[in-house]
Amino acid sequence: MNAVPQNNPGTLASGQFDVARVREDFPILSAKVHGKPLVYFDNGATSQKPQCVIDAIDHYYRAENSNIHRGVHHLSEQATAAYEAARGKLRGFINARSDKEIIFVRGTTEAINLVAQSYGRAFLKAGDEIVVSAMEHHSNIVPWQMLCEQVGAKLRVIPINHDGEIVMEEFERLLTDKTKFVSVTHVSNALGTVVPVKEIIALAHGRGVPVLLDGAQAVPHLQIDVQDLDCDFYAFSGHKMFGPTGVGVLYGRAELLEKMPPYQGGGDMISLVTFEKTHYNVLPYKFEAGTPNIADGIALGVAVDYLRGLDWAAVTAHEDGLLRYATEALGQIAALRIIGTAKEKAGVLSFVFDHVHAHDVGTILDQEGVAVRAGHHCAMPVMQRFGVPATARASFAFYNTIEEIDVLVRAIGRVLKVFG
Ligand code: 7TS
């Protein structure tokens, strides 16, 4: 093995990603399942956590635990500083202009519900239209359907082609004077498609329509710059980007957030309460009612530190290599059909067999130590589009290896032996 450069422990002197070294940071990756080494290919559902994130949670409860934004005592001040420092790290992570634009939420789902209920109920009315795509996760469909029921707006859906790509001409056709909001995924969880979001945003902004991007599957793979994207909202979950569950971020453009009413009422989101009138707190606290998930917020900041310590050129090359290798290897299995063949993809390989249900595939792979997700991936309209009840999905992270893909291929061989 080549010498490790001083400043980048995850990169070999050759410039190649040092996956063996990086795997050591994730204790669970050395686990065995059914007596076999774990091959964790369910990163789209949730990623594994590096030791530093696990340590941060442990340290917080051992040494810092206290409620924030209220105490005058030492521990509370310390916890507040750590939590606000994490907000600053997340601001840097997506290159937002200000910490005011970083709202801590439970995850992507809550972030989208917040925008639908706060922005949507305040600014949309009967006859208005909201545009989503045919490859959205349910959490970028149902909150908008609920809003439509509440205000009388209509949901419009951009179709996708047989490769799982947005049909841009259809999007342009759907954009009319009635369109008042566009909400699309950045990367599809079921297909892996990387959506041309900059083009979508430019077209929507041309008509003065704000755009939310669901970044749940993008943040673990792409470097996000919300100023460069020029999106109005960006939603993501900590647990898919090597941080803890129960915490995520809604980025919102400050001008829009200022205009929006609070999502929930309670402590922390007010500056003055009387029975006659309540004054709301400044951003971002206006949207953060109640005691937040302090420990996990701080640990998410540590996950950001970890990610920023990696050489992303090397990470991207490694991940591209994994997806290419897996696509070629699985593509050679005659009975197997890959669902999602977009030109631009990240991290996801969905597949089906005509004669074996995805759940049976998942169960046999599990016996070989290989964890994949089998089902509709909370994207039932995608399954309907491709005429399949479910797919098996291998979703990769930078700590996965080519050798693990070889294990997957052999395990699929077992599936085919069992089912003939
Ligand atoms: N949006 C996308 C694109 C997702 O992939 C997911 C979760 C969500 C939103 C919701 O995120 P949450 O953290 O609020 O639950 N996707 C998946 C998946 O693909 N398998 O399990 C969860």
Image (cartoon, rainbow, N blue to C red):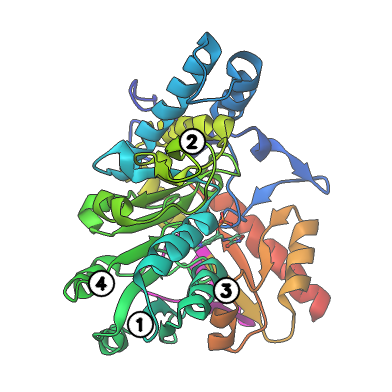
In whole angstroms, how far apart are the C-alphas of marks 2 and 1? 33 Å
Q: Residues within 10 Å of mark 1 (few under 14, many from 20)?
A: some
Q: How many marks?
A: 4
Q: Residues within 10 Å of mark 4 (few under 14, many from 20)?
A: many
Residue 54 included in the magenta stretch of the image: no
Question: Cβ(mark 3) to ligand 1 < 8 Å?
Answer: yes
Q: Amino acid at mark 4?
A: Val
Q: Amino acid at mark 3?
A: Ala
Outermost residue, left direction? 206
Mark 3–mark 1 contact, CB under 8 Å? no
Q: Amino acid at mark 2?
A: Asp
| Mark nearer the N terminus (2 vs 3) | 2
Disc 3 vs disc 1: which is toward the camera? 1
Quarter of the image where one finds residue 194: bottom left
Residue 334 included in the magenta stretch of the image: yes
Element marked by disc 3: loop
| Mark nearer the N terminus (4 vs 3) | 4
Determine whether 396 is above or below 364 in the image. Answer: above
Q: Image quadrant of ligand 1?
A: bottom right
Element marked by disc 1: loop
In whole angstroms, how far apart are the C-alphas of marks 4 and 3? 25 Å
| Mark nearer the N terminus (4 vs 2) | 4
| Mark nearer the N terminus (4 vs 1) | 1
Q: Which residue is mark 2?
A: 268
| Mark nearer the N terminus (3 vs 1) | 1
Q: Which residues are magenta?
A: 326-348
- Give how far across and how far down residue 33 sits, in percent: 78, 47
Q: Which residue is mark 1?
A: 128
Q: Is residue 204 visible?
A: yes
